[in-house]
Image: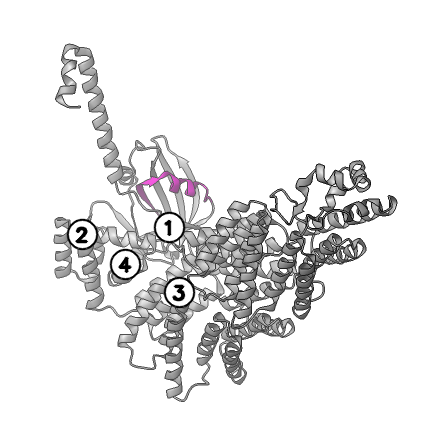
Amino acid sequence: MDSEQLNWTHHFPKIRDRVYELNKQLCDRVKSDIELLQMPVVEPMLFSMKTTSSHDLSSHCATYQWNQMLLEALRRLPQNDRSRQDMVTICRVQYHDDPSELRKIERFEKTYQPQSAISWYTQDCFIHKVINKALQTEDIDIIFKFRSFVIDLYDALSDLHNKFKTENSNVITVYRGQQMEASELNNLKASKNTIISLKSFLSTTKRQDVALIFAGDGSNRPEIESVLFEITIDVNRSHKPLADISNVSHMSDENEVLLSMGMLFVVQSVKQMENNVWKIQLTATDESRVKLNDYLKNSYSRLEDCDDPLFELAILLNESYSYGKAEKYLLMLLEEYTENPGKIYNVLGICNCVKHNYRRGLYYYIKALNCYIMEGSSMHPVCCHIYNNIGQIYAQEEDYERAMSFYKTALEIHLKYPTVGPNVFVRTLTRIGDTYERFGNYDDAFKNYFHAHEIVEHRHLNNDMMAARLYSSIGAAYLKLGQYNKSLQYCKRNLEILQGLFADNKLPIACAYQEIGGVYDAKGEYDEALRQYKEAERIYTINGIYSHVALAGVYGNIGVIYRKKEEYELALYYLQKSLQTEEQFEKGMSISIAKRYNNIGVVYHSMGNIEQGIEYTRKAINCIQNAQTPDESELGMFYSNLASYYADQGNTEQALHYCNFSLEIKRRVYPSNHPTFARTFSTMGTILALNGDISMAIHYYEMAVKIYKEVFDVNHPEYKTAVMRLTELKHFKALIEEHDVKALKSLQALDSNRVVAVPLSFYIDNGTKKIAALTDGADYLKNEDTHLFIDASDETTTTAPTLACFEGS
């Protein structure tokens, strides 16, 4: 409020005083809010791990194990001046505009020694802030640059831990007071009797009164809560180091006890105290309470035994789907590596292929293979990885014959060394099975799948990544064969394994949700399918992935579900988004692009735009025919859809042609009871009904219903629709037989260029009226309910009911 605005208040003292009072209150409140926002609220430092069942594998448990392996990898890296200089450099950049911190950084650079790590960590300076943030957010880049200090701190704490055990009784109680976001407190309230793990180092004190000072008085509610942790620890049983650091801490008067990252606690209770402070009671526990994943335990053992910790760190990052970081560390290693770099080139190939840089990936794979060829070791077991990876690139490019040749070379090596690398043997057999499945050779596909499954069972690899991929492939094959319950069983097993290996939001879990959604879609459980697809989309978004070939598949699947739920605008939005995303990665004549075109065509037809439906379906067929390896299973589906569209246009001659063409293709690809035949039989029945051959129409619908009954639940939408249409046809036939054929003569008297199709339900809904239609003839049809007809010579009305049965992919 400026001076001119305040002038009038001089004539009204009471108002003037009130304005000043309010102004002061407002300023005080703004100041308080600023102080609150600037207060260093602790980031979420804990994550829960389910312990309700010893058989459950929690994704958080996997996260805990990955973090322990990361710490071990960092500890095994050589500690040199370069790693310390990396830390100083990044801190100077981060605090370039803070003279006070820059002076501390300079002092650190000149005076730091490993034995002073605890003292530096406990100072109010750049180290504590940057390290804790990196550990809490799992920022691998910062952790790697600070690796020297993190290990110095961990080792210094370990040294003090041994002395601390001899000076203390078995059990001690320490406290920590802090400000905490309400959402984090709510998470802890819901975590009673669960295990939580420290992501970072944690400062505590033996004195509750000191901790309460840091907790505050609850005056910053509701956004921020005051919290007091009361932590009970059996020092002699602790699996991670802790120690009283009063003698080495920068704050020597706080009776400080420092706890190591990775310590585990059970949440005993969360209660509110009288002074507006929440008290959280924790009891330390050890890894015996946690069901550790066998695959990750093996990875940890491999890490302990390795000679190249940086390479194993890159492998660890690669297996946790941090491909960009893995590639960076591999390139660093390549500069210093003097032995055979073949294994490094191979992993560099993987890092590029997952980013869809297939040519770059192939370049690295070939370099890797050449390293072993030059040593005369092209048939060494390690080369199985390389042959598999090269084959996978050719499979991605739909050159399946060349892919199979590389897979079979890998198979030769496995047969020569049957006990070496059983998990890689599983992958080779799985990929051979996948290739046979692409050719429609399901017998040989399952022969290889189940051979791989025998190895999984015999070598106890049930929780291995290769087992997950195997179950995914088996589930996909059963889905194509229409055996949906078996498909769902294997797809869910794949998800269970992945949840034990990775955190909730990792990309492989998104793919697993997508696969399960596909099965529910096929089963007609559209709401559940949509839930699974949306979960996959959520994970991609969390990972910052907005342009990815797998995400294109998610968009496409969501679009198909919305089409089946008759939400056509949403369906078209997602399908167009899917096509745009796919076109960034796939060449114009790929099977994936063909599927997008087909599904868009189905939506346009459902919206009443048959011409657009035909146009997009022909684009889909053209893609398949010009693909390097045409997929007949998709082609049969597209021709079936095309037949449906021509039927709705009244061009029954073209419709019958494409319907028979579709059946001819499908008989070469699918077993006779596959639901895809039921869909084509339904379309054939519709076309024959339009031609007036009601008896043959009934015959085809009966065949469709028989197949649906074998593979679908009675509540499946396609089964219910086929039964309804069969009932209508039989009712119609009964009406014809009962009332002679006067109505048919009337229908035949109509201009054949005008009325093309009459929906069967027209004759069923109002029995008396429809019988009258059969006897009164064309005049009735021209004057009543003409919106029910498809008019070929003018335009198709959007209210016309759909007779045909469609397929989406």
Which amino acid is tagged 4? Ile
Q: Secondary structure at mark 4?
A: helix
Dividing the picture into quadrants, the one containing residue 772 is: top right
Crowd around label 2: few <14 · some 14–19 · many ≥20 (10 Å): some
Query: What residue did someone put label 1 on?
Result: 233
Crowd around label 4: few <14 · some 14–19 · many ≥20 (10 Å): some
Alpha carbon distance from label 3 to label 2: 34 Å
Q: Quadrant of the N terminus?
A: top left
Alpha carbon distance from label 3 to label 1: 46 Å
Mark 1 or mark 3, which is nearer the start of the sequence?
1
Alpha carbon distance from label 4 to label 3: 23 Å
Which amino acid is tagged 2? Tyr
Mark 3 or mark 4, which is nearer the start of the sequence?
4
Mark 2 or mark 3, which is nearer the start of the sequence?
2
Is 692 in front, or is 322? 692
The residue sitting at 29% across, 60% down in the picture is: 141
Residue 288 position in % (x across, y down) = 46, 58
Say whether residue 800 is left or right of residue 82.
right
Mark 2 or mark 4, which is nearer the start of the sequence?
2
The part of the chain drawn in magenta is 170-192
Closest to the camera, between mark 1 and mark 4, is 4
What's the colour scheme?
A: one colour
Say whether residue 117 is left or right of residue 685.
left
Which amino acid is tagged 3? Lys
Residue 47 vertical position relative to residue 15 in the rendered view, above or below: below
Disc number for residue 142: 4
183 drawn magenta: yes
Query: What residue did someone put label 2 on?
Result: 95
Tell me, yes or no, if residue 243 can be seen here. Answer: no
Q: Secondary structure at mark 2?
A: loop
Residue 796 position in % (x across, y down) = 61, 46
